[in-house]
Image (cartoon, grey):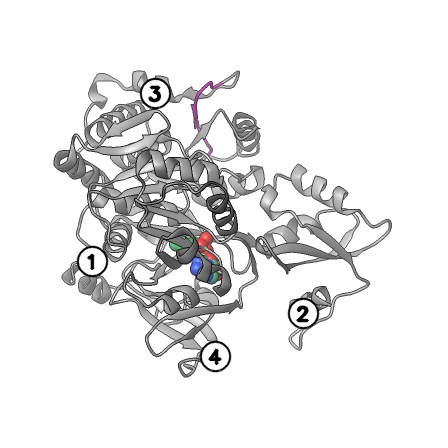
Amino acid sequence: MAQDWPGWPNTDADRYRAAGYWAGHTFDQLLTSWSVEHGDRTALVDGERRFSYAALEAEVDRVARGLRGLGVTRGDRFIVQLPNIAEFVIGWFALQRVGAVPVHAMPAHRAAEIEHLARLSGAVGYFIADRHARFDYRELAAEVRKTRQDCAESLKHVIVIGDPGEHDFVSFADLAERGGPTATGPTAGTADSGDLALLLLSGGTTGLPKLIPRTHDDYAYNARASAEVCGLTRDSVFLSVLPIGFNYTWCCPGALGTWCVGGTVVLAPNPSPETVFSLVEREKVTIAAVNPPLVPYLLAEYGANRPDLSTLTLLQVGSARLADDLARRITPELGVPIQQVFGMAEGLLNYTRLDDPDELRCTTQGVPLSPDDEIRVVDEQDNPVPDGEPGELLTRGPYTLRGYYRAAEHNARSFTPDGFYRTGDLVRRLPSGHLIVVGRVKDQINRGGEKIPSTEVEGHLLAHPAVKGAALVGQPDAVFGEVPVAFLVCHGQSPTLREVTAFLKERGLAPYKLPTRLVLVEEFPHTAVGKIDKKALAARLDS
Ligand code: OOB
């Protein structure tokens, strides 16, 4: 497995171990120790279902037995595409128990994304819900499986929460029966803490999105250190508002960070302000993590109905730039302290600190999590810029990858020779170390936290018979910060927006990536080095 992704050089790995960041535990070992330590306490709430730590572990064990019965084994990759339901947690830890590697997919992903994930990861299996939010995931699984039929590492096992339907899929509820008598109990030493623990999908910088390898050591540190910086304790109740499979919700500190300290995780079935506030009241939530587009809705709902938010001690906002003016309204209006979170699935996390003055909490995206997060802010030649000046953020540290999974060629461009990850984010660093996100040099659109890899969408647009050239550009938007607009050069009859979005949907693209507007042009402006000049195109949108 080691040749699939470059790990940390030994000197750095030794340093991270000596500093205590890498504690040498796998997630399966962590689950067992949490269950021993906090057995009767509530680990997870999903609607009317409540799981103590001990009950959660028992469920995990049952499902792990079933996975072993199917032949799932150490190192196997397994796509997990589940909404905010307890089975995400049970399935995820069951995979850990057999030493397999969850590959996180978002509920909004469709055939194009799942197919890409399956191909990149070589996954042997796929967890889905039967239906969720008016979408039938069994149809999606059947479609992806058909296109992967030719491949040795195909999705052999599709495990369905709910009704498996007509297909040759396995019901999650029946999984345990598959386990033979020899398949009981956790297997000691199924994985090493330096092994791959999970694969996350990158938001994309150039080309198609890559997979991010995260180890037990680095991801457990990510969770534990985040819990500490956010002041979590065993009395903390974390509300998962965004999809639970999102790195932010799962580990920053999210669910995993909450369990590290013996707290309770509550799953919100949807992010509507009514749902969020009724769960805050019912479950006495202490910390919730949201993205910027949700904030105005939360403020409006609070203004209208004045729910009791007295238990809430922290509202985290992250995944896209929060406008300073909106940030400044949160604490005065809701009476809840805010924390900005500027993170990335690749690793680096920045948090405003609980004791930062209001001004820093409202106008900056925080300081790095770890004392050993190394930060460089550089110009186009990789030379450091002075504090206060904008530059690209480069970073290296104990929980930031040194290379993507099975992407050697791409890695040479995305990392400096000395191992710094090129984030593609433009930041300004204040003398205090706080970072302010001022822009981006990567070819990506951030639609209120959902990342749209431009090249991926352009590839699909170019497959349309009338399209000769395509460029996806972000247009400023009051709700989402920015939304994708497609500039097209066409021959023959130009398609309409409706035709183009229908075409992209047909190709299996996730709905949030669909352009909201078409601009037809004769030809594209080009930069000095011959690339499509997207800045010039974006400028046409402003006018
Ligand atoms: C989070 O992770 P990803 O991998 O979906 O996206 C990372 C990118 C960053 O490189 C940056 O461009 C943008 O999302 N971003 C922000 C931001 N937080 C993320 N841009 C401005 N302000 C912020 N606060 O989005 C993510 C991962 C862990 C925790 C939080 C967010």
Task: Determine if the magenta segment contains residue 160.
Answer: yes
Figure disc tally: 4
Image quadrant in which the C terminus is located = bottom right
Q: Which residue is mark 4?
A: 379
- Residue 187 percent across, percent down from the top left: 19, 32
- Residue 44 percent across, percent down from the top left: 29, 33
For marks 3 and 1 on the same chain, the one whose residue lies earlier in the sequence: 1
What's the mark number on residue 21?
1
Distance (Cα) linking label 3 and label 2: 53 Å
Q: Which residue is mark 2?
A: 533
**Within 10 angstroms of label 3, few (less than 14), some, or many (20 or more) residues?**
many
- Amino acid type, residue under disc 4 in the picture: Asp
- Residue 333 percent across, percent down from the top left: 43, 54
For marks 1 and 2 on the same chain, the one whose residue lies earlier in the sequence: 1
| Farthest residue, direction right | 492
- Amino acid type, residue under disc 1 in the picture: Tyr
